[in-house]
Amino acid sequence: MASKVLPQALFITPRSSNQCPPKKLGLSTFPSPRSTSLNLNRLSTSRFSSNSFGFHFRPIVVSPKRFFIVSAEADNEGELGPDENTEEEETVSETESEVKLDAEDEAKPPRKPRVKLGDIMGILNKRAIEASEKERPVPDLRTGDIVEIKLEVPENRRRLSIYKGIVISKQNAGIHTTIRVRRIIAGVGVEIVFPVYSPNIKEIKVVNHRKVRRARLYYLRDKLPRLSTFK
Amino acid sequence: MAARFASRLSHVGRSVFGGLGNISSGSLRTSLDSTWNNFLSQQQQRTFIQMRTVLKVVDNSGAKKVMCIQALKGKKGARLGDTIVASVKEAHPNGKVKKGEVVYGVVVRAAMQRGRCDGSEVKFDDNAVVLLDKQGQPRGTRVFGPVPHELRKKKHLKILTLAEHIA
C-alpha cells in the first residue's frame, strides 16, 4: 500500500517543491498513516532537493514535532528500502538515490545515536531528575523509613515547615516520584503525599527505619494511633 | 474488617478455581481479572462532603456533631476549606449552639485528599468543621486538632491563629 503511494510522491516532488511551504510540516502530523507518508515524503524530498535534510536530525528538544515527523519518515524509508528496492530504483532512481546519498552523507559525520520515539519521555524524565539532583540530592527512600521533610510553603515564607512521619508508600513515576508520609498530629492522623523532586522540599532526612514486610502500609490506617506516632 | 474481607475474597478465589476444571483458559482469565479488580478497589474511595454527611465539630462553640445540608460551593460537594450549611445533630448541654440549629461551617479536615499547587496532597483521617457566623468569623474561641494551609487562602486567618497545629 505504501509502496504504491511512494512512487507517486516521488514523481510529484520536482513540481511541488516551491509550492509546499515548510510550515505545513508542523500541521500535518497525524491524519491517517497513508496520507502522512504521502505528505512526509513529498515535503521531505522537497527538502532533500534543497539540501537541508541534515539539519532536522539535530534539534531533538527544540522542535519535537518536526523531529517526530522526520524520524517517522526515515523509519518508513528504511522499511521500504529492503522490501521494494527494485521497484524504487526502476521508477525514480535518480531523485531517490540522490536523496539517499544526501541523507547518508549528512547522517554519517555527526554519528549521533538515533533517538527512538518511545525513548523520548524516558530521556526527558532522566534529564529532569538529574537537574533536580544537582540542586538537592535525594536519599534512597523506602517504605517503612521514618523521614523528616523540610518544606517551604509559598504562603508561609518565613519558616520552613517540618513534616515527620513514616513512609507508607512510594510511587515511582520519574520526576513525579511521590512518597506518602503518615503521622498522628494532635490526635488526628494526617497523610501527605510529597513529590520527592519538588523544588519546594528543602531537605529530606531519613531519621529511622521500621522493619515492615510490605510495600504499602495502608494497614496502619486501621491500627492503633500509637503505631503512627512519631515524636 | 479489612482482614475479614480479604479472607472472604480468598474463599471466593478457591471455589472459583474448583469449579473451573473443565472450562477453557479464556474464561478463567476473565474471572481472575474480576477478582483482582475487587481486590484493588478494596481501598476506600473518599469523596466529597455532601448532604447528609455527618461531621465532627472541633471548636468550643457547643456543638458536637453536625450534618451537612448544603455545600455552598461546588456541584458535587464540599472539599477541604469550603464552607457548608449544616444542622446541629448533637450538642453539649450548655453551649452557645443548640441542637437543631442551622449553622454555617468551614471544613477543616476532610478524608478526601486535596491537591496543593506544588503537586502534594493532604488527607486527614476524619471530617471536621469549625462553625462560623454569617460573616465568616468563627463562633468558638478555641480550635482543636490540626488545620490545613488551605484556610489561609480562603481567608480564615482567625482559625489559623487559634489552631493547635497547621498541617
Image (spheres, coloured by chain):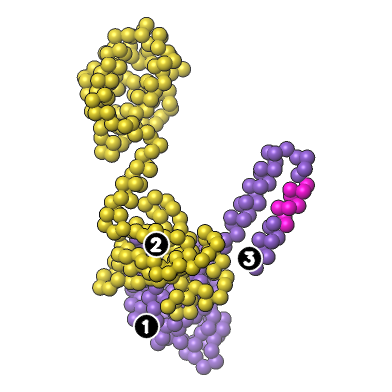
Chain colours: A yellow, B purple
Picture quarter with the C terminus of chain B: bottom left
Q: Is residue A226 left or right of residue B17?
A: left
In the picture, the disc for residue B162 is 1
In the rendered image, the vertical position of residue B41 relative to residue B62, given as above or below: above
Residues at marks 1 and 2, common chain?
A: no
**Viewer can see residue A219:** yes
Q: Secondary structure at mark 3?
A: helix
In the picture, the disc for residue A194 is 2
Between the C-alphas of marks 2 and 3, the distance is 26 Å
Region in magenta: B11-19
Q: Chain of mark 2?
A: A
Q: Is residue A211 left or right of residue A45?
A: right
Q: Which residue is mark 3?
A: B2
In the rendered image, the vertical position of residue A126 relative to residue B98, given as above or below: above
Give the residue displayed 37% in from the left and 42% down from the top.
A121
Indicate yes or no whether the magenta region holds residue A23: no
Disc 1 residue type? Leu
In the rendered image, the vertical position of residue A224 relative to residue B90, given as above or below: above
Whole-percent x, y for residue B117 in the image: 35, 61
Q: Is residue B149 left or right of residue B19?
A: left
Q: Secondary structure at mark 1?
A: helix
Q: Secondary structure at mark 2?
A: strand
Whole-percent x, y for residue A141 in the image: 41, 60
In the rendered image, the vertical position of residue A15 relative to residue B20, given as above or below: above
Disc 2 residue type? Phe
